[in-house]
Image: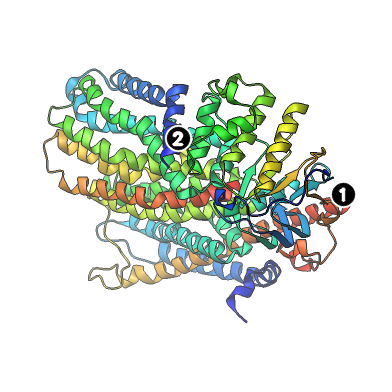
Amino acid sequence: MSLWEYANPTRFMRVTGAALPWLWALTALCLAVGLTWGFFFTPDDFRQGSTVKIIYLHVPSALMGINAWLMMLVTSLIWLIRRHHVSALAAKAAAPVGATFTLIALATGALWGQPMWGTWWEWDPRLTSFLVLFLFYLGYMALWAAIEDPDTAADLTSVLCLVGSVFAILSRYALVFWNQGLHQGASLSLDAEENVHDVFWYPLLVCIAGFVLLFVALVFLRTRTEIRARRIKALETRARMSAA
Amino acid sequence: MIALLARDLRLAIRAGGGFGLALAFFLIVVTLTPFAVGPNTATLSLIAPGILWLGALLACLLSLDRIFALDWEDGALDLIATSPLPLEGAAAIKAAAHWLTTGLPLTLAAPVLGVLLNLPPPGFLWLALSLALGTPALSVIGTFGAALTVGVKRGGLLMSLIVLPLYVPTLIFGAEVARRGAEAQAIATPLAALAAISLACVALLPFAAAAALRVNLR
Amino acid sequence: MSSPAAASPPLHSATTSFDTTPEPLRLAGLAVARGGVPVLAGLEAEVVPGEALILRGPNGSGKTTLLRTLAGLQPPAAGTIAPGAEAMAYASHADGNKATLTVQENLGFWARLHGLADIAPALAAFDLAPLADRPAAALSAGQKRRLGLARMVLTRRPVWLFDEPTVSLDRDAVARFAAAVTEHLCRGGLAVIATHIDLGLPHARTLDVTPFRATAAPGDAAHAADAFADDDGSAYL
């Protein structure tokens, strides 16, 4: 049994239909535990005070904002190479979810930046990268919405996703060059000497797990909706042809 | 390939839209800028490189949807696609024709308009050079965007939404060259980056544009 | 269908005038789709050099989709086409000529695109020489159509594909068109023409596409490509 068999819409519907209730339960559990732990049972930071607790929303949503685009890139490639419809629909389904996570990351970043940097918005390369990423999401979703034929739309958005990924990385480097930035360094890299303290780290991990599960659950749900819409279209076509 | 380039240039000259409109738009943007930010020459010379780059970029954007739309509507794109000329070549030629009718005139006009914005004297050369290097990238990226949206009716706004984020790196490095040039700073790094982006776009994006055209022609 | 005067065409007499050597056009189990919806399925046909294939069928029966597939603009949903798209020249509903360019400039562009310099044969074949310096915008509908058809003479492709070529042509122009196609066939070329009128071509055979229209029957080959149309729908509920 190979992984590709899940590309069959019928099989995908069966498996995800069975998995979704469990996924939702696990998501709720992780988010409830992670956020409660993070918000109420961690000490204040000695410099940043209680504002630091926004990392339990900011960091996971920023991570998922990027990961959603990566997932779209992979599913777009699978569509272009192997022509699995579920893959293209999963990319379509992931885009608004990823865009929302990116928007949450931007909003929480602004809320955090106000007390820390004294300004709601700073043209810092990291924040600006996310703004540019958000624009890429908008263009991608608009292209899906504008094209009627589903296979044409899947092909064109996949090409845009590929080209857009290259330009997103280019923009990232251009922005670092353009403005050196205020944003603190990565908090989670495994090899850095100065990471966040374990007290913040464990609840953050639980939150990240919760956001990943939330993303997967939302993408499954939305892909199922897209598959059903395609099913309706296929049945309508068949009905029209037998009538003719 | 030369035949297609010659035809597109001839069409641009006959129809009058190509050279004139983009240049007039550029002039208007530059004229409106002091009305918005005030006539203070110090302020103007500070923002002149950026405004000139942004104006050139928007003027470029204005004519992108004509690259394929006309040939799409009258069926010529079908016939070009079935001709011996590969679609990749056609896309590259279309981008070249767009640059010759838009990017090149904008590059030549920019230093003249720089006078209006009180651009510091060392900036003129670097502004022209950065536009000469950067506008080919704008044309090719725009050709890709036009190829993606050629099947969409009234796709101009959609195309802007897709193309503008792709313009970010070119704009950053291009405007940086112009700004540093105006302030007589070292320009080697952004200039090299701008040239690299431009060359890579010219080399690779015609393939992506041709892929998008093939999908749209199906 | 075939006129008695036309003897067996002199095959391969002038093959050097084509980019590729004319070979028989073979459609095997060909299925075509428009916008993902199957239109025609199970098409079988063979046309030898010097022969024309006339496509018939009601509007919307898939003739245009078939021609676009033959021209290589879209991939077949199933089956094979030989030879490849590099042997085909396609004349669609739209002529692709530019209103601001003259007749001569329009034809000159297509000629150079196909590696030719001389447009005189095309001007002569469709009686366009008197109009050579006129902008295409100033032509009548029938004259525009003649300009569009004249392009085919300049393609050097052995297989000519026409989609309703005689629309807005008068009787005289239809005769010119038939003569141009006949000459092409006599030089060893082939033609596939979707048309409703009798062109009086020698060695023409007719293919009615109506029996090949894709049906909605479950298990039909045309639906095999649609991943969302299988019969067991329980998983979707």
For numbered disc 1, what is the local secondary structure?
A: loop
Residue that numbered label 1 is attached to: A244
Residue drawn at x 35%, y 51% is B203
Q: Specify few, some or many for label 2: CA neighbours under 10 Å numbering under 14, 14-19, or 20 or more.
A: many
Tell me the subunit letter for badge 1. A
Colouring of the image: rainbow
Residue B97 point in image, percent of width and height: 40, 35
Q: Quadrant of the N terminus of chain B?
A: top left
Residue C100 point in image, percent of width and height: 52, 23
Residue that numbered label 2 is attached to: B64
Q: Which amino acid is tagged 2?
A: Leu
Q: Which amino acid is tagged 1?
A: Ala
Q: Specify few, some or many for label 1: CA neighbours under 10 Å numbering under 14, 14-19, or 20 or more.
A: few
Residue drawn at x 68%, y 24% is C141
Q: Is residue A144 above or below residue A13?
A: above
In the rendered image, is residue C62 in sight?
no
The numbered disc on residue C45 is none
Q: Foreground residue, C219 or A150?
A: C219
In which quadrant of the rendered view does residue C222 lie?
bottom right
Residue drawn at x 25%, y 70% is A192
Q: What is the distance, in whole Å, between disc 2 and disc 1 at their CAs?
A: 42 Å
